[in-house]
Amino acid sequence: MEEVMSYVMEKLKEALLMLENFGGQVLLMMLNFVGQLLLKLLNFAGQGLLSLKNFGCQVLLSLLDFCTQILLTLKNFVGQGLLSLKNFGCQVLLSLLNFCTQILLTLKNFVGQVPLALKNFGWQALVTLEKFGGRVLLTLKNFGWQTLLTLEKYGGRMLLTLKNFGRQVLVTVRNFGWQVVLTLKNYGGQVTSWLDEVFPPGTRVEKIKYWFHLALPFLIVALVLIFFIYCCYYHGDFLVNVMNHLKTVCCELFKIMKHLFTCCWRSKEPIFKMMKAPGRNIIIPRFDFEANPKLYFINLRAYPGDMLV
């Protein structure tokens, strides 16, 4: 019996060593695979960030040029408006100065030549008013035309600036889209070539089945761990109940293993302690009687003539 047990223990040790070597190789291959995937993802993220950086710089430069053109246009418009107002004010002041000079001259000659002065004053006042009105109308007309021309130029520049800005944005978006498409295409080609190297088309199905059968125990363990974490996070009471049930099952298995060990290694001795049944002429296990004496006496009262002393 000892030789059989030693032979079984040696076989179990060999099986454990084989399982340990196999699990280490599988874990090493899985770690290499995950590392390659992470490197490819990091390269793809770096290319995407570089493309976004270039796109942002182009948009900022376009906005800066647009704001500069708007400020220059507003500056020119304000300068032209101020110049027009200055010219209009100067013309009005000159007209008033001439009008006042003529009035003073008329008043000077008024004492000596009242009738003639009045006549001349009336005609001069009419002529002066006519001239002043004509100049005012001409000044207003010139000011209106200058304002319209300035607004037209400003509107044309604004439209041209907006058109150039829209073209620059469209070109930038198109370049960014082509860069993203080329990056995805290159990444897809790399992934396809890598898959062709790892899983050749001729033996792809067999290799996938082989690796799936190898990885199935680890997948099951991973699913169990995920379920365990989910229960810990969302259902704390459920996990406590499961642990209690597992504890009960483990205790029962321990008792069964203990009984089997006692049966195999102590076959000459009784498995349980025995005792004489109270009120009956039989031998019963002490464990059953001590576990529930009340039930035993209820059965004894129900069947009083069963194996009496």
Image (cartoon, rainbow, N blue to C red):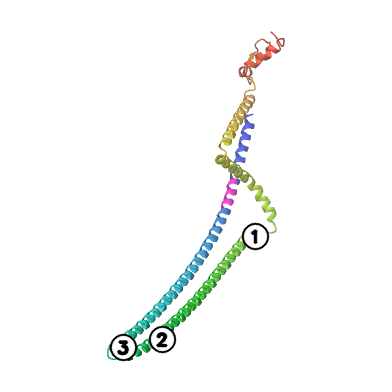
Foreground of the two, 153 or 277: 153
| Residue pointed to by mark 1 | 196
- Which quarter of the figure has residue 179? bottom right
Q: Amino acid at mark 1?
A: Asp
Q: Amino acid at mark 3?
A: Thr
Give the answer, above or below, for where 73 lies relative to 214. Answer: below
Give the answer, above or below, for where 215 lies relative to 4. Answer: below
Q: Quadrant of the N terminus?
A: top right
Q: Residue at x 62, y 40 (%)?
A: 15
Q: Nearer the viewer, mark 3 or mark 2?
A: 3
Crowd class of label 3 (few under 14; some 14 to 19; many from 20; radius 10 Å): many
Crowd class of label 1 (few under 14; some 14 to 19; many from 20; radius 10 Å): few
Q: Which mark is residue 69?
A: none
Q: CA distance from mark 3 to mark 2?
A: 18 Å
| Residue pointed to by mark 2 | 130
Image location (x, y in percent) of residue 51:
52, 65
Q: Earlier in the sequence, mark 3 or mark 1?
A: 3
Q: Amino acid at mark 2?
A: Glu
Crowd class of label 2 (few under 14; some 14 to 19; many from 20; radius 10 Å): few
Give the side of residue 183 with respect to residue 87, left or right: right
Give the side of residue 129 with respect to residue 228, left or right: left
Give the answer, above or below, for where 92 lies relative to 243. Answer: below
Secondary structure mostly seen in magenta is helix
Q: Secondary structure at mark 2?
A: helix
- Magenta-tinted stretch: 23-31
| Residue pointed to by mark 3 | 106
Q: Earlier in the sequence, mark 3 or mark 2?
A: 3
Given contact means CB atoms under 8 Å apart, are the residues at marks 3 and 2 in contact?
Answer: no
Q: Secondary structure at mark 1?
A: helix
Foreground of the two, 51 or 145: 145
